[in-house]
Image (cartoon, grey):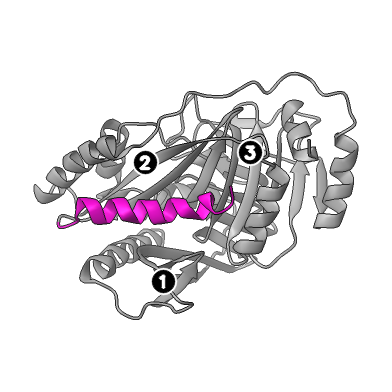
Amino acid sequence: MSGFEALIMQDKGFVIYRIPNEKPVLILQEKNPIQCLRDLDELNGKTGFVFAPFQIKDSSPLMLMQPDVTVAGREDIDKYLSHVCIEDEKAGAGNDRSFLSGDYESYSSAFSSFITSLKEKRFEKLVLSRTSVHTKESSFSLKEVFYNACERYNDAFVYLYHTPETGTWLGSTPEILLTGENACWNTVALAGTLPYKKALLPDAWSMKNRKEQQLVADYVRDRLVSKGIAPSVNGPFTVRAGELAHLKSEFSFSLSDKSNLGSLLKLLHPTPAVCGLPKEEAYQFIIENEGYDRRYYSGFMGFINPDGKTDLYVNLRCMEIGEDRLTLYAGGGLLSHSELDMEWRETEAKLQTMLDLI
């Protein structure tokens, strides 16, 4: 048993994460309870590691971890965790949850409902997601999977997160929600998906992919402008994320007042990249018609610090880790002319990001 499993057995709140191209960091909060918040506005003025769900509710609260233990670098993390392993391990953390498997039949049924609403012009875009459940083999090692993700996906935000309230999650994501420090801040619009083949980025994108990305980019720009922010825009351009490629636009802007980062996050989250347009109507439609609870998939996580550096990422390629099962999540954007089998194959390709680790 690794130190990661030992922490989970003791039901301690912790996260180990790796910002792209930086060293991994392990943080724990032991002295005080981790905060369960009910609204993104409650993050205003706060510092700590945020773990936010798609929909904030009692069963999936907005979590804010304010660490009293911080260890940086793999060597020091492994050394610290080697001492955790020999501590008395409580038989807690038996918080395996009921999982829903997103098979083709259930996905097809949800797709029909989503595409009908799109063709009726109730929405410009909707994001349909699904799960895939796998047996957790006895050889499964959180330590190996986490460090494997760090090696495979060097340009992604990689994390392993556990609290008694959320259970255990692991993921790797390329999509920034909000990063910055001092006056310099950034967000992105990431949408459209194609395979990354033969070490070549695709140079030809369909109209569906381009329109989907443009809807996300327009939304992000309009949200920022509504707050009196005038961003500079770079893109769209093609980027690699594991064995996939996406269209990306970058938005850079200044923030003179950083005390209201929670309110800015509330304005951006969930973006059309994980939800749809119009935002509020699409958000409610997904909750009522997708057929399962996304929980922390398509939420966001990372460190927020209005007086220092903030790095927050959308929780895209991820899995929920139970006692004997692994539940993987993936989704894709639908427009009125989207095709069922093509969208199913896209989710299969996205699920492969996590499958490659296990």
Q: Earlier in the sequence, mark 1 or mark 2?
A: 2
Residue 251 appears in the figure: no
**Which secondary structure lies at badge 2?**
strand
Residue 64's label in the rendered image is 3
Splitting the image into 4 quarters, where does residue 167 fall?
top right
**Which secondary structure lies at badge 1?**
strand
The residue carrying pointer 2 sits among few (fewer than 14), some (14 to 19) or many (20 or more) residues within 10 Å by Cα, namely many
Residue 130's label in the rendered image is 2
Q: Which residue is mark 1?
A: 249
Q: Which residue is at 26% across, 44% downward? A: 282
The residue carrying pointer 3 sits among few (fewer than 14), some (14 to 19) or many (20 or more) residues within 10 Å by Cα, namely many
Whether 254 is drawn above or below 200: the answer is: above
Q: Amino acid at mark 1?
A: Ser
Residue 156's label in the rendered image is none
Name the residue furthest left: 120
Q: Which residues are magenta?
A: 337-358
Residue 207 appears in the figure: yes
Whether 295 is drawn above or below 44: the answer is: above
Q: Which residue is at 17% across, 41% downward? A: 112
Residue 352 left/right relative to 225? right
Q: Is residue 122 magenta?
A: no
Count of numbered marks: 3
Q: Amino acid at mark 2?
A: Arg
Residue 152 left/right relative to 131? right
**Which secondary structure lies at badge 3?**
strand
